[in-house]
Image (tube, rainbow, N blue to C red):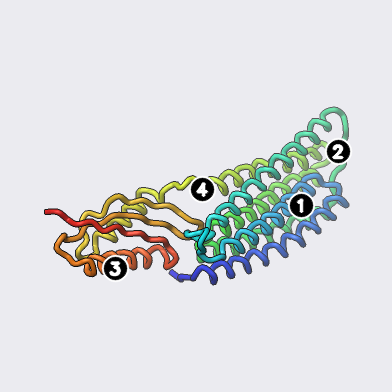
Amino acid sequence: MIQFNTKERLEKARRVTWIGMIWNVCLTIVKFIVGYTAGSSALIADAVHSLSDFASDISVLIGLKVAAKPVDHDHNYGHGKFETLATIIVGVMLFVVGIGILWNSVTIILDHFKSEPLIPPGAIALYAIIVSIVVKEGLYQYTVKSGKSLHSQVLIANAWHHRSDAFSSVAVLIGVSGAILLGNRWVILDPISAGLVSILILKVAAEASSDSFNELMEVSLGKEREKEILALVAEVPGVSIPHNLRTRKIGNTVAIDMHIKVDKGLSIVKAHDISTIVENKLKNSFGADSFISIHVEPLLR
């Protein structure tokens, strides 16, 4: 596994986000122009989705910039929580966009059944959608791979924002194709596909936000990770009965607090050396930027 220090990791994450943002701007402009010209409500909805991607990219860049600040007097655990907050902002943006698109789609469908005829979209809309699908799936693959290698939840969340746009474009492609190729009776497929896009967006929003909400609520790393921590510490010579384990995430890093028992006859220096070995072992597994606190207690026999 490749290890990055905090500054290097955040610089790489920002570069990935900038690349995605540039593509999002281009796609948004193209889809708005083509959607308006071709008369496709689904493509315009898809353009709004791409615009939300651009807005989320800005939030991610701000979050990563703040998260890159080092530990200081007022932030003893660094600024990693801001990266978590940025992830939640991405999810909230997705949710707002999903509700807006769903509302617009339902309104168009209801108006249609009130005898307001819909005009089939132009064929040029199909080309714009195909280009969008290819580009957004490419951005997803690139961003999620980078997010996993950098251990960045905000990048992974933003990657799913890209993929949700690709999925929405697939739904739009189906709806617009039907509206164009199947005749006037099927023109309603265009706003219906826009509605399906909104449901997908809402699902992604919920998934993108849940883990970050848990982090802000100081949820532990989970039973499996804590078992792993206890097993690692128990392997250190001189350590007995590791206990009182408390864990949490701080952005990309973790905080681990625990107690260990050592032989009561050991000198303070030797007991401290053992705790340092434990600390280094945990940092080798969870990253050099992890916050590790080890409390040493005498083992009373």
- Identified at 69% across, 50% down, the residue is 170
Amino acid, disc 1: Ala
Q: Earlier in the sequence, mark 1 or mark 4?
A: 1
Q: Nearer the viewer, mark 1 or mark 2?
A: 1
* Residue assigned mark 1: 47
Q: Quadrant of residue 163?
A: bottom right
Q: Earlier in the sequence, mark 1 or mark 2?
A: 1
Looking at this view, is 44 or 120 the one in front? Answer: 44
Q: Residues within 10 Å of mark 4 (few under 14, many from 20)?
A: some
* Residue assigned mark 3: 277
Q: Nearer the viewer, mark 1 or mark 4?
A: 4
Per the model, the C-alpha gap separating discs 1 and 3 is 54 Å
Pinpoint residue 279: horizontal percent, then vertical percent.
33, 64
- Identified at 62% across, 66% down, the residue is 14
Pinpoint residue 132: horizontal percent, then vertical percent.
72, 58
* Residue assigned mark 4: 216
In this view, which residue lies farthest toward the left? 301
Per the model, the C-alpha gap separating discs 1 and 4 is 32 Å
Q: Earlier in the sequence, mark 2 or mark 3?
A: 2
Q: Look at the numbered discs 3 and 4 and tell me whether their residues touch, using CB distance below 8 Å.
A: no
**Quick check: 162 above or below 113?**
below
